[in-house]
Amino acid sequence: MSNLNPIMEIHHLVKTFGDNEVLKDVDFTANEGEVICIIGSSGSGKSTLLRCINMLETPTSGEILHRGKIVSDSTDDLNSYRSKVGMVFQSFNLFNNMTVLENCMIGVTAVLKKDRKHAREISLHYLKKVGMAAYINAKPSQISGGQKQRVAIARALAMEPEMMLFDEPTSALDPEMVGEVLSVMKNLVSEGMTMIIVTHEMAFARDVSTRVVFMDKGVIAEDGPPRQIFLNPQNPRTKEFLSRFLN
Ligand code: ADP
Ligand code: MG
């Protein structure tokens, strides 16, 4: 379990789009080694929270601290911060005009400024790890959704991040491909990667996470160990969501 070394802290985070207040005074901490699953209905603010954590959205107010230091919106700060926080999207977001290998190398050369030889080695290492070494010359259009998502995970890992964010990584996949992606994620968990995962895969959340966060209408309605959330929810809204969800 976690030794309570915070990697990332969020204080009083508010995010509005126009007059729609999507995140309402959210406080949240991710400690080293934690595997945090975020669950909740569509529109409750889960993606916005992840995007704020990665500074893909600018908070309306509140602050984000990385290793105790406020993350500012200066470009240098942002590039360095983002390279430490890997992100995997529902829709893969691969570059369709590049090969699998080039997709993995591009961040390593462009953001981390490593030479191509190093970028190639590290990309091959992580592509092997997700079982995609045989596809390095393929274009995204030539591989399946599950394979694309494994490449997207390898691409994020090639940056050697200190934590990984996943936004519904299996929601766009055909059912038969969900397992191969969850299995790659389980391997990361077993290696001790700190992870925040927005997911509707309740069995995965129950079995793999150290903490589950239930979001409801822009607030964290409950935050606790999976045993509590799934067997003994303290908030009636958690109970209601899970019973609705499981039906
Ligand atoms: P979830 O991931 O839990 O389904 P989101 O964070 O995507 O929820 O969305 C929460 C709310 O924020 C929704 O009402 C959505 O329409 C709104 N929203 C999200 N992104 C934007 C945006 N870029 N512009 C305007 N509204 C947005
Ligand atoms: Mg979402």
Image (spheres, helix red, strand yellow):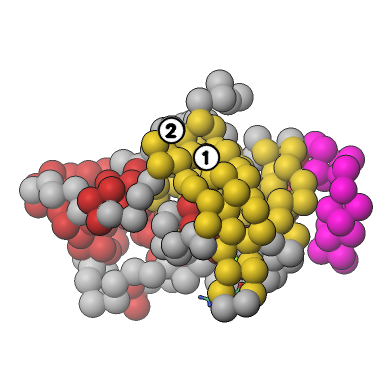
**Which residue is at 65% across, 53% downward?**
25
Gap in Å between the C-alphas at discs 1 and 2?
A: 8 Å
Label 2, residues with CA under 10 Å away: few <14, some 14-19, many ≥20: few
Q: For the magenta stretch, what is the residue range?
A: 227-247
Quarter of the image with the N terminus in it: top right
Residue 191 location in percent, x, y? 46, 32
- Using the image, tell me which numbered label, if any, was put on residue 9: 1
Foreground: 201 or 55?
55
Q: Main secondary structure of the magenta part?
A: helix
Residue found farthest to the top: 3
Compared across the picture, whether 227 is left or right of 164 comes to right
| Dot 1: element | strand
Q: Are marks 1 and 2 in contact (CB under 8 Å)?
A: yes
Q: Is residue 189 visible?
A: no
Inspect the magenta stretch and tell me whether residue 92 lies in it.
no
Q: Residue 12, percent across and down?
A: 60, 49
Residue sitting at 69 percent across and 70 percent down? 42
What residue does disc 2 label? 68
Can you tell which mark lies on residue 162?
Answer: none
Tag 2 or tag 1, which sits nearer the N-term? 1
Numbered disc 2: secondary structure: loop
Q: Which amino acid does label 2 sit on?
A: Gly
User: Quadrant of residue 173 in the image?
Assistant: bottom right
Locate residue 240, reporting x and y percent: 89, 59
Residue 89 or residue 171, whichever sits in front? 89
Amino acid type at image mark 1: Glu
Q: In this view, does 49 lie above or below 34?
A: below
Q: In which quadrant of the rendered image does the C terminus lie?
A: bottom right
**Residue at point 60%, 43% (across, down):** 28
Residue 67 visible to an observer of this rendering:
yes
